[in-house]
Image: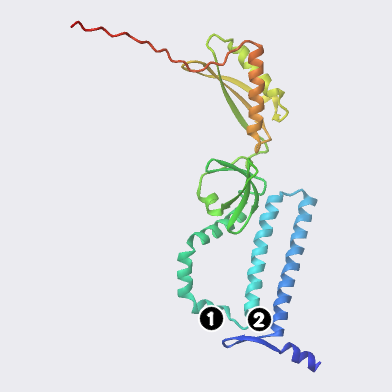
Amino acid sequence: MKTLDQLFTLELFHIGNYKIHLSNIAIILLILLVTKLVSWAIRTALYRRTRKNDLDPGSTYALFQIIRYVLWILAIGLILESVGIQLTLLLAGSAALLVGVGLGLQQTFNDIISGIILLGERSIKIGDVLEIDGDVVQIQSIGLRTSKGLNRDEISIIIPNSLITTSKVINWSHQSEKTRFRIDVGVAYGSDVDKVIRILEESAIEHPDVSNPDLIEGRLVNFGNSSLDFQILFFSKNIFRINKVKSDIRRIINRKFADNQITIPFPQVDLHVKSGLHKED
């Protein structure tokens, strides 16, 4: 027993007035182990409850992230206390340094606060499709400082959280599982308007990713300079890959127009050349 006490009181190294014993290392490892076990237990319980009660996985993820950050902050505080560093004295003695660091890392702190807001508000969840600065991304993870998303080209994008909270962001997944989209097309003057609308609606109905066929609507929206301008409106759940869906529908429209002798015009400009008069000598 005496040998064990001597082993735990064995001094490994010291920094200034602080001495690090083997017992301190053991306590630090124990704190880290307990923190990881508690974090794992909370995560398992939350996700089991989510599956059992059919709750929103995004909300569960946000709640777990907040709990995990709180646990690790407490763990770091306990570790510092275990080696004899008092947090109150540390904060008081480094107040001026913290001000300077705060000014230098202002944007980082802004991102962290934004991350806490995102996790707390839960206005954006894992799997949501966002449009940020003209780029469409599907959120894969929300961290304390940054979030990670995947764009339509399968490229992983790291997004500062402050960009999401301070910019105009369109959340295509926020209101419902499906969203309405539109395709614009122009046909030559003299075409049968009713026939064009019927073809547009039939083209959208043919695509398997179009939801609620009863809500498909073709419209004559304008008399253009060189064409009658139409729109086809439809709902789809395939929000993230909607450009592929639109491309497929355009191909169907083009085929049906060709089969029914409906022309898609292109802008034309008539140029009149007037010959000049020759001056007599």
Q: Secondary structure at mark 1?
A: helix
Q: Position of residue 106 (x, y in %)?
A: 48, 62
Is any part of residue 216 visible from this angle? no
- Dot 1 alpha-carbon crowd within 10 angstroms: few under 14, some 14 to 19, many 20 or more: few
Figure colour scheme: rainbow
Q: Give the residue furthest to the front.
A: 281
**Residues at badges 2 and 1 in contact (C-beta under 8 Å)?**
no
Is any part of residue 254 visible from this angle? yes
**Badge 1 is on which residue?**
89
* Amino acid type, mark 2: Ser
Residue 98 is left or right of residue 56, and the answer is: left
Residue at 68 percent of width and 35 percent of height: 238
Q: Position of residue 98 (x, y in %)?
A: 49, 71
Residue at 70 percent of width and 25 percent of height: 213
Identify whether 55 is placed above or below 216.
below
Q: Position of residue 39 (x, y in %)?
A: 73, 65
User: Which quarter of the figure is the N terminus placed in?
Assistant: bottom right
Identify whether 125 is placed above or below 246.
below
Residue at 52 percent of width and 43 percent of height: 133
**Badge 2 is on which residue?**
82
Identify whether 229 is placed above or below 60.
above
Residue 225 is left or right of residue 132, and the answer is: left
Q: Secondary structure at mark 2?
A: helix
* Amino acid type, mark 1: Leu
Q: Give the residue furthest to the top.
A: 280
